Amino acid sequence: MKRPTAAPLPDPDYDSLAAANKRDRLSSGILLVAGLGLLLALPFVLRAGAGFILPLVAAMVLHLALARVADWLGAKGIPNSFASLLALAMMVALIVLAVALVVQPAFGLIDSLPEIASRLNQRIQVISGMFGRIMRAADDFSSLINKNGSRAVVLSSGGSIKDMLLQTPGVLLEGVLTLLLTYFMLEARLRVRRHILVEREDFAGSLRAAAVLREMQSQIGTYFITNISVAGVIGIIVSAGAWAFGWDMPLMWGGLAAIFNLLPYIGPLTMIALLALFGLGSDAPLGWAIAPTICYGVLHATEANVVTPIIMGKRLAVSPVAILASLIFFSWVWGVAGALLAAPLLLILSVMLDYIGRPNLIGFLLGEPLFSEPKISAGARTGSETAA
């Protein structure tokens, strides 16, 4: 008895495949153009709606950062509402402590600013005499100081102080709204997780959404805990160094170093500039005056290139170019608040792209698909990571 032979496979319809490929590329091209248009319009929308959007975004980032702390407190038997409130209170206490270490002693420097400026002018004249390059800048600075008396320099900034005082109520209101939103997001996090896992029809989509949320919380929490811990150690070292060099208010300098260390690249550079200005404005010899700046530069280089990469590892490794671009973009849109949120928002975007696929712009121009395969799939996660 003859075995039945399999029917021959039909020849592929190359014309249909080519047409389908053209349709896919056309759809991807339209999506790419729409995405570029949205990207160009995004900064203006974010700036115009900063009063509404900024508290929401800040609360979302803080919620992701504090979720692990609230979960840890909940695991100790503390009720969810109180655990959320306690986690938020710990963050507020840390901020108040940092501000108290910096702001209160800084008022003592106001009266000494003219004297520091005069010494800095003399130091600049000495350096310009050594190098012969900045004599004109030193003369202009000297004439500015001595034009109407040394106090005129301090009083001339009254307009800026007035503007800052006028903006204070709005900033305080946004801060209170951000804290309230953060608390309610923290308190609702367990219900949101339950909704994602249980109350959805697509189980695979639920796993993916839960994995994305879990990864965001893990990365943002690790980022904040690591950076705050490193900043605290930097602040202690700088305080000890300021005390060793005989500077007034060493705790203030340590607090400034800790706060500026939370801003990638820009913060440490600002701290170096401050140390250089106040060092040159002191009455110490030139070598002793610039020694704190050099020591802090070595300390920051060691922390940024050795300590932090070892602690964070490759899991939180982000391109320095991407960090700088994010820092420039969000500081332009939202100022100092945007600079503080730039790196966490970049981490959130990176996690989302790892799960949904990153745009392959160069490959798309060469004929490849617009989106590459996601690096991480929900199925690759363990049950403990997705069962949140």
Image (cartoon, grey):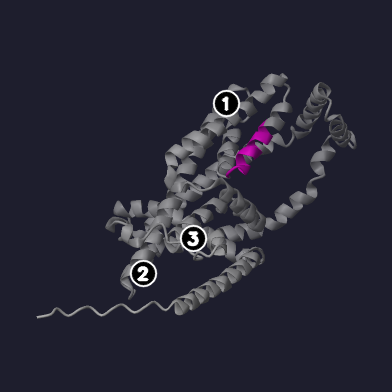
Image quarter hosting the N terminus: bottom left
Vertically, is 312 above or below 16? above
Q: Badge 1: few (under 14), some or many (20 or more) residues near its Cα, within 10 Å?
A: some
Residue type at numbered disc 1: Gly
Residue identifier under label 1: 241
Q: Nearer the viewer, mark 3 or mark 1?
A: 3
Q: Main secondary structure of the magenta part?
A: helix
Residue type at numbered disc 2: Gly
* C-beta proximity under 8 Å, tags 3 and 1: no
Q: Badge 2: few (under 14), some or many (20 or more) residues near its Cα, within 10 Å?
A: some
Residue identifier under label 2: 205
Residue 174: percent from left, percent from top: 59, 60
Residue identifier under label 3: 358
Q: Quadrant of residue 7?
A: bottom left
Residue 86 shows up from this direction: no
Please state the extent of the stretch shown in magenta in the rendering.
Answer: 264-275
Q: Badge 3: few (under 14), some or many (20 or more) residues near its Cα, within 10 Å?
A: some
**Is 269 contained in the magenta span?**
yes
Residue 194: percent from left, percent from top: 33, 67
Q: CA distance from mark 2 to mark 3?
A: 18 Å
Residue 52: percent from left, percent from top: 59, 66
**Front position in the image: 365 or 150:** 365
